[in-house]
């Protein structure tokens, strides 16, 4: 599920940038991109929670350290990219 949500978050972010470039209202796409990023985190957390309940320590030790870094980097990138149109719009008004 987290893969599907992640792909949808990327698609919403690309749509956000496209709508901004085309001069159309991009705020809904921006909200969708950020919301889908949050849902991706929730789905990943659910996956890890299932591993804890099943006491699958090998899966946790194998996946969690790398995924932690990836989730941080991708979340920060999502916030910056989805917020860029607002910042550019504010800069253009000055």
Image (cartoon, grey):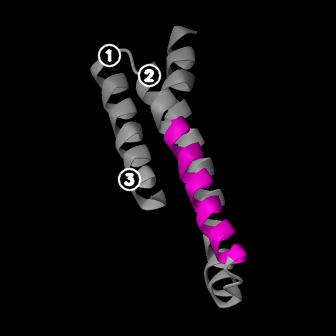
Residue located at (45% from left, 58% from top)? 1
Residue 18 sits inside the magenta stretch? no
Q: Considering only order in the chain, which callout, 2 or 1, is on the residue closer to the N terminus?
A: 1
Neighbour tally class for label 2: few under 14, some 14-19, many 20 plus, Cα within 10 Å: few
- In this figure, which residue is indicated by the disc labeled 1? 23
- In this figure, which residue is indicated by the disc labeled 3? 7
Q: Is 42 above or below relative to 87? A: below
Q: Considering only order in the chain, which callout, 2 or 3, is on the residue closer to the N terminus?
A: 3
Relative image position of residue 19 (x, y in whole percent):
32, 25
Q: Is 73 above or below relative to 18? A: below
Which residues are drawn in magenta? 34-53
- In this figure, which residue is indicated by the disc labeled 2? 28
Residue located at (62% from left, 60% from top)? 46
Q: CA distance from mark 1 to mark 2?
A: 14 Å
- Residue 12 falls left or right of residue 44: left
Neighbour tally class for label 3: few under 14, some 14-19, many 20 plus, Cα within 10 Å: some
């Amino acid at each position: 599920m987290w893969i599907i949500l992640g792909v949808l978050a990327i698609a919403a972010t690309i749509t956000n940038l496209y709508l901004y470039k085309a001069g159309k209202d991009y705020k809904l796409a921006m909200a969708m991109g950020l919301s889908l990023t949050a849902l991706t985190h929730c789905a990943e957390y659910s996956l890890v929670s299932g591993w804890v309940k099943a006491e699958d320590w090998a899966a946790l030790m194998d996946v969690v350290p790398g995924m932690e870094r990836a989730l941080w980097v991708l979340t920060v990138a999502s916030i910056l990219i989805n917020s860029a149109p607002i910042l550019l719009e504010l800069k253009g008004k000055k």
